[in-house]
Amino acid sequence: MANSMEVKGSVIASIPSFIENKFGKEGLTKWLDHISIDARQIFSEKIKEDNWYPLTISLTEPMANIAHLFYNWDLKKASWELGRYSADFSISNLKKVFFKIGSTTFFLRKAADFMNGYYRPASITPISVVDGEGVFHITKFDEIEKTIEFRIAGWIERVLEIAKNKNISVEVTQSLKDFKPYTEFFVTWE
């Protein structure tokens, strides 16, 4: 399907590491045995972080399998924890230094650019980012699922922690998946 959504390899590269770190080699083997043949083919090889992969096969379905196998179908918890882990996995020490010298508001304004570089076609926009509060909208994301929204929310939460913020709250206040005009993330921190 030519118009299928794609995800950057850097997003999915953290999945096997997350599973092995949290559930051991046995958990990783169990997960690999339960994902589709197409997904297994992707994850059996080294993920090329600059390559693009089909979203459903490489992200949506594998996250649902994680929720099923390890979280008693709690899609929110599984996806949120994976998003948090992927923030640690993808943010290098160099970028962590950036957090020490750059403001949270500056980084969050740039976070939408990062996200737009991870999913295609997609449109993720900062609507308002002021000190202590931010609102982001996803207005285009044809194959969005709650798992992806929760993963992004977990990623945002962990990034704010890495930037040494406190009393962080990230809420998905509405969703494209619920036939709303956009998915909205409302973020607060101190």
Image (spheres, grey):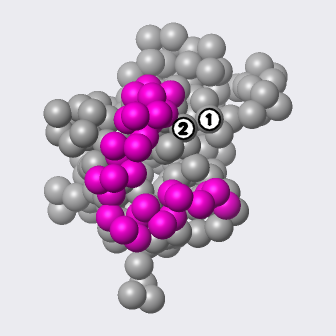
Residue 122: x and y in percent read 48, 66
**Numbered disc 2: secondary structure:** helix
Which residue matches tag 2? 17
Q: Please tell me in which quadrant of the rendered image residue 59 appears.
A: bottom left
Magenta segment:
19-48
Near-viewer residue (58 or 44): 44
Q: Residue visible at 58% across and 69% down?
A: 52
46 relative to 127 in the view: left or right: right
Contact between labelled residues 1 and 2, with CB atoms less than 8 Å apart: yes
Which labelled disc corresponds to residue 89?
Answer: 1
Task: Indicate yes or no whether the magenta region holds residue 23.
Answer: yes
Residue 76 percent location from the top left of the image: 26, 36
Query: Residue 174 appears at what percent x and percent y?
Result: 24, 47
Query: Element type at marker 1?
Result: helix
Tag 1: amino acid: Phe
Sequence-first disc among 2 and 1: 2
